């Protein structure tokens, strides 16, 4: 079996951590059992480009139990947990191409290693695998059944491909499932982002001014958790509705140019380029912390900062300090990559339980409906979302009401009035 990981001898530690995460993933355990019995992926090759973490590993095991022939690479150069990669290879015989800290050339070599597997289904996180397949290996498109996409950035890219007529197979936006963005994006990103910042810096958040770029689901969670830790939160936005919502949620809202001189900690999570740019760095306080929780490392214009700096030093793991001509020091965390995965462990297993169950069931949906799906981006079917939420509530020991026949009839009738 071909693979490319850091150290196979880390496998035992990886398995222990995978088992620890599995304890918090009861929904995925139910899917795993169902897949083991029904084998919905039998005879199919599945290529995944995802963060190689304990939670992802448990998803891979569930897909493998369903009969899939799997290979996986990392969706970000800094997000791999090397012991988990080793365990998947050693204990589950799943080829893994992922090394924490891999350079860009290795990253793209790993993408192509997955595509060498000639997958029928792609499970992507950021759309790099889908994009590489379409641009560089179009001869493989004929064998594709479809794909799933895990993150907001990837969904944006895929919708752009579909609008241009460039997307050649159906993709299910797992990111847009309610059980994903309401819980994973909000609570998972919020907690893990603050965890990454604290682990990288050992800073006290209380009393600091925290500037959160964007107010989508991920940024909502970051703002909520920063405020909960005692931070004074400022939100920057381009969307008037989201900006208004941030105001109603109790946060100050202003342009980044106004926030730059007063912020202590800056976090981007927008999916766009140069959200923090040269003119923002010019007015930042000395000692400012700048980091990103969006998928790609383009939200912070680090090349411009490097050009402005007279000195650059790695002062702590995951902290690069740039000294300006006037003596100010600006600190970039995690090289501008996902701070929650670069410096911490990513989202807690209990929220990834729902997201990854959605991924697995979305793959099954692709197979079951392969004859009728068009080459476009689909939302996860509502019945899948409802099923995942019900499983999660059951696992938590929580019961909810059920409509009576009379109530159902009332809701479905237009004839009842006051």
Image: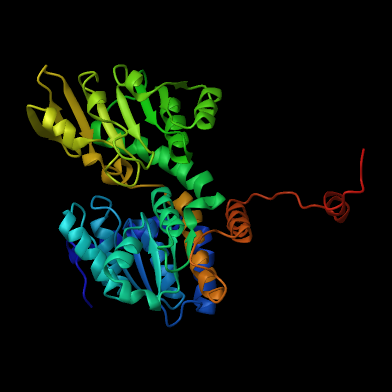
Looking at the image, is 241 positioned above or below residue 109?
above
Location of residue 96 by image quarter: bottom left
Looking at the image, is 151 positioned above or below residue 87?
above
Would you say residue 173 is visible in this rendering? yes
Question: Which residue is outermost to the bottom?
Answer: 43
- Residue 2 is left or right of residue 62, and the answer is left
Quadrant the N terminus occupies? bottom left
Q: Residue at x 39, y 53 (%)?
A: 157
**Residue 32, image x, y percentages:** 49, 69
Question: Which residue is outermost to the front?
Answer: 164
**Residue 61, image x, y percentages:** 40, 68
- Residue 89 is left or right of residue 105, and the answer is right
Q: Nearer the viewer, residue 309 or 177?
A: 309
Q: Residue at x 46, y 36 (%)?
A: 221
Location of residue 120 by image quarter: bottom left
Q: Residue at x 23, y 53 (%)?
A: 77
Looking at the image, is 68 positioned above or below residue 336?
below
Q: Nearer the viewer, residue 315 or 329?
A: 329
**Residue 95, image x, y percentages:** 27, 71
Q: Nearer the viewer, residue 96 or 327?
A: 327
Q: Residue at x 47, y 34 (%)?
A: 220
- Residue 7 is left or right of residue 244, and the answer is left
Quadrant the C terminus occupies? top right
């Amino acid at each position: 079996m071909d693979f490319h990981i850091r150290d196979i001898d880390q496998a035992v530690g990886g398995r222990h951590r995978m088992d620890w995460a599995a304890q918090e993933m009861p929904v995925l355990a139910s899917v795993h059992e169902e897949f083991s019995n029904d084998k919905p992926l039998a005879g199919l090759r599945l290529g995944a480009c995802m963060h190689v973490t304990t939670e992802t590993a448990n998803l891979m095991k569930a897909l493998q139990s369903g009969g899939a022939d799997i290979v996986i690479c990392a969706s970000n150069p800094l997000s791999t947990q090397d012991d988990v990669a080793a365990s998947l290879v050693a204990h589950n015989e799943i080829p893994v191409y992922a090394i924490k800290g891999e350079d860009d050339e290795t990253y793209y070599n790993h993408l192509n290693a997955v595509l060498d597997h000639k997958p029928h289904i792609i499970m992507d996180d950021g759309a790099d695998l889908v994009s590489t397949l379409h641009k560089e290996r179009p001869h493989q498109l004929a064998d594709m059944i479809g794909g799933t996409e895990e993150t907001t950035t990837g969904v944006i890219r895929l919708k752009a491909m579909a609008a241009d007529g460039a997307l050649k197979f159906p993709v299910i936006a797992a990111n847009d499932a309610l059980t994903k963005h309401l819980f994973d994006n909000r609570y998972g990103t919020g907690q893990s982002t603050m965890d990454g910042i604290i682990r990288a810096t050992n800073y006290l958040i209380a009393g600091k001014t925290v500037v959160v770029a964007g107010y989508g689901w991920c940024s909502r969670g970051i703002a909520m958790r920063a405020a909960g830790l005692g931070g004074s939160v400022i939100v920057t936005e381009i969307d008037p509705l989201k900006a208004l919502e941030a105001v109603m949620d109790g946060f100050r809202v202003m342009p980044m140019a106004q926030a730059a001189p007063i912020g202590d900690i800056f976090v981007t999570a927008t999916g766009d380029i140069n959200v923090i740019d040269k003119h923002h760095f010019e007015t930042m306080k000395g000692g400012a912390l700048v980091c990103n929780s969006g998928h790609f490392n383009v939200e912070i214009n680090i090349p411009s900062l490097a050009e402005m700096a007279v000195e650059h030093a790695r002062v702590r793991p995951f902290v690069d300090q740039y000294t300006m001509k006037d003596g100010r020091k600006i600190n970039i965390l995690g090289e501008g990559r996902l701070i929650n995965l670069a410096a911490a462990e990513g989202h807690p297993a209990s929220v990834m339980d729902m997201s990854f169950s959605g991924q697995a069931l979305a793959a099954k949906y692709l197979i079951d409906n392969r004859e009728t799906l068009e080459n476009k981006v689909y939302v996860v079917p509502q019945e899948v979302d409802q099923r995942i939420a019900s499983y999660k509530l059951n696992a938590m020991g929580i019961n909810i009401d059920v409509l009576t026949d009379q109530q159902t009839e009332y809701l479905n009738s237009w004839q009842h009035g006051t």
